[in-house]
Structures are given as C-alpha cells and as structure tokens.
Image: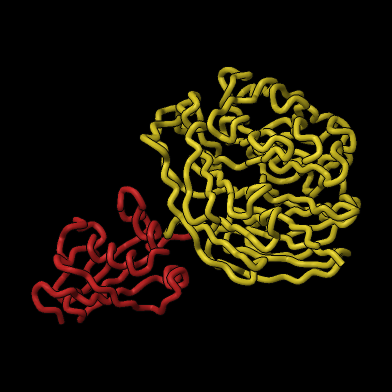
Amino acid sequence: MSGVRVLVGTRKGAFILTSDGLRRDWKVEGPLFGGWQVFHMKGSPVDPNRLYASQSQGWFGQQVQRSDDGGESWAPVGNEFRYEGVPGTHQWYDGTPHPWKFERVWHLEPSLEDADTVYAGVEDAALFRSGDGGASWQELAGLREHGSGPKWQPGAGGMCLHTILLDPSRPHRMFIAISAAGVFRTDDGGATWHARNRGLNSEGILPEPEADVGHCVHRIAMHPSRPDTLFMQKHWDVMRSDDGGDSWVEVSGNLPSDFGFPIQVHAHEPETVYVVPIKSDSEHYPPEGKLRVYRSRTGGNEWEPLTRGLPQENCYVNVLRDAMAVDGLDRCGVYFGTTGGDVYASNDDGDTWTGIVRDLPSVLSVEVQTLP
Amino acid sequence: MSAAGEAAELRVVLPEHLRTLAQVGREVVVSVTPPVTLAAALAALEARYPVLRGAIRDHGSLERRAFIRFFAVGRDLSHQAPDAPLPAAVVDGHEPFVVVGAMAGG
C-alpha cells in the first residue's frame, strides 16, 4: 500500500510524520536538528529518499542538511551562499538603501529531473542553485541584477525569496516570488528574469499601487497539468493568472478575509484551491477565532469553509506561507501546520480534518511526499 | 607545551550545537602553526572541521557572527583583533579557548 511522509519544519527542529495510504494512523519522529529553525524540508520528486532541509539559527547561521535514506540519517552539505559580484543595495523598511546580506534559506526546491539539482530561495532575496546535491551553491544572479533590485524591500519577516515553482512542461521556465517585490519569471533557466505583477494592486501599501515591483506576494501555487495557471495569496487579495503570470485577476470572492499566507491546489482538480484566511496584516489569526480552510472548486471567487475537525472557537494561530501541502493520493490529502504547533490533515479533499500531532514548536513549513 | 616555531596544540571548547554539527565532544584539540592568533586558531578549527565554516564567522568577510563570543583565561577575547596573539596559557594548552553562543533568547 502506498503511504505518505509529511516533513514538518518548526522553530526548534524538524519532525517527520508517516502514515499508510489511509492516512489515519501516524508515526511521529523528531525533533531533528533540535534547537534550530527548520525553515523548509522537501524531497526530490525524482528520488523520494533524497531530502533537503534548511536549518538556521541566529547564533550559528545557516546549514543545509541532506538525507539519502528518506530521513533516517542526515549530513550537512554546503552552507556558503555568496552573492555574485558586488551585491549593492535594496530598500530598507524606512526606504533607505540597505546592503544585500545573506541571512537564511527560506525554501528549497528540488529539481523535477535530477535529485542532485536543487534550488534555494534565500533572504536577502536571491536564488541559488546546486548541481551537486547541495555541496556547493551558485547564485542565479540574473534575478537580483535584472534591474528592479534596488526597489525591493523586506516584508515583516525579512526580504525573502520564498516560492520557487518549476514548470514541468517547459524545463527552462521557472517562477519565483519575493516579499516584498513580487513575482518574477524566467524562460531561459534563470539567466534572465522579468517581473510578472500586472494586475496586482497594493493600495495603501505602495505609493504606486499597481507598480511593476514592490508587491508583498505571500505564496504562489501551480497545478502541474496547467502550468500557465497560477494562484496567489498576496498580502491582501487572492489572485489568479491564466497566462503564466503575464496578468493577474482577483478571485477573493466571498472569503471572510483575503489576507493570508499559504495557497495550494488540489492534486487532481486544477480548479480546486485552498487558502487559510487570516483576519488582517496586524492580526495574524483566523477571523472570529475559527480555524477555517477555505476551498474553491471553481478556481476562485466562490469559496466554502472547511471546518469539520478544526477548532471553531478561541483559536488564534497563524498558518505560514510554506506550511500547507497536498499529497498525490485519491482522495487528495491536505495538510497544514500552525504557529501553535499543531499539524492537521485531511484524507478527503479537505472535507474533514484530524490533528496528526499537537504542541510542536511553531510550525514554519509542511511538505508531503506520496510514497509508492 | 609547544616550543618556539612548533605547532601549538590548542584546546577548543565548543557550544553544544557546534559539537552536534561537528560530531565531537565538548573539547577538541587543533594544531595551529605560529603565530597563534585568534584568526589562526579559527582557521585551524575550520580546516579540521569544515562543517563549522560559516557557523562561527562569516564565510566571506571572516567576521565573527554577532552572537558568538570567544572566552579564555577569564577574559572576553571577542573584540580583540583577529591577528592579535592568543594568551600564552591557551597557546601552551593549559587553558582552553572557549567558543560561546551569546546569551540571548530564542
């Protein structure tokens, strides 16, 4: 029987949750890398035993860990992320120029074709690539140097490159998203990049609300069968694009709040999308104290609350941008972790939820592997 | 104890998280060719345990990470010049060179 492996990164270590295809009974292992922030863990789609983890700490900096046996054992690999050339400046919170400085790896995206190739999205925002299993990293500097870099600015969490989407039908096309700069696309494997933010509106946040760059994009998601269709959870607004990011339209519809962080697409239904509305940019908790995932089966605009099994009173946690994932089973499994340290799973497309594990350190990221 | 010109055998005490990374115990010994300075000691430590590169000082600038401190013989050496010599008692191996994670919440 097939199974799933859920990779959970938290503020004080990582946890691996496993179950069979029924996804009812769970084994919890961890903490791995105890005391370190694990911003993200992800497995290679080519080799499910190859896992990468971003391990970070204020005292001792960045480590990247790699497992070749599905998380049984780990070894640190390369941790030198050196910007190409003289990195220059971006905007600081107060609008003044601020030197680019590497802080941490937010997101690791293994290649769709080669287990030794992996991309890293980092703070201060840049994209790195390793072709040797993480031993060494080279910046794809065309992104940072494409021209608008001096206008980028940090969001509250830092100036992070947090999303990397690889187009399965066009090996040289890739999308990335930065808070707070926006979405960028390359069609030549990362050599050149173009902002793809037309249609985004950041009224009250940017002096020019429809500027080319500067938007606080929280997460973007794609269904692999429709790589031209993208869904976005922005600082405010849920958006979609049907032309590879060339233009965006708002699909927030009847959501109780269109602020939030994660967004995901159902594994088998490209028009079924999940978000977790959060009350506001300063009140990072669910409206009315009710933890509700919202699902749209129409690609946005029409949303239904999913509440069965989720706390519906006195719940004031957040769900961070990388803390939601879907598996590839039928029915689709949906997973998310909260800043309160709980991880919830649904084995029926989101209709019902159960807590897999509770009271972990604050959850930073959730990924899931569907195992043969 | 090292004679003049011979490599010094430095005792280095690491904080717990760096012990875990390097897979070593509380204290390690590294050979440092004179002059035995702060920078030379750290370079020898990183050469012996490459996983510590970037964890104590920045890869490129070699600046001490902000929340790292260096103690020895009851003194805080964190702010001394990288090319300043380490105390004789450390060079002789009588006292350890201590790498500390600064007191900070988190």
Q: Is residue A275 left or right of residue A8?
A: right
The C terminus of chain A: image quadrant: bottom right
Image location (x, y in percent) of residue A240: 76, 29
Colour given to chain A in the rendered image: yellow
Q: Is residue A222 above or below residue A368?
A: above
Location of residue B90 by image quarter? bottom left
Chain for colour red: B
Image location (x, y in percent) of residue A225: 81, 39
Q: Is residue A190 above or below residue A319?
A: above
The foreground one among B69 and B93 is B93
Q: Is residue A326 left or right of residue A160?
A: right
Location of residue A9 by image quarter? bottom right
Residue at x 75% of width, y 29% of height: A239
Residue A279 visible (yes or no): no
Image location (x, y in percent) of residue B63: 30, 52
Residue at x 36% of width, y 60% of height: B56
Q: Is residue A266 left or right of residue A205?
A: right
Residue sticking out furthest to the left: B4
Image location (x, y in percent) of residue A281: 65, 37
Residue at x 82% of width, y 35% of height: A255
Q: Is residue B102 above or below residue A84?
A: below
Residue A226 visible (yes or no): yes
The foreground one among A260 and A73 is A73
Q: How many marks?
A: 0
Q: Looking at the image, what colour scheme do you see?
A: by chain
The N terminus of chain A: image quadrant: bottom right
Location of residue B35 by image quarter? bottom left
The foreground one among A279 and A190 is A190
Residue at x 67% of width, y 66% of height: A70
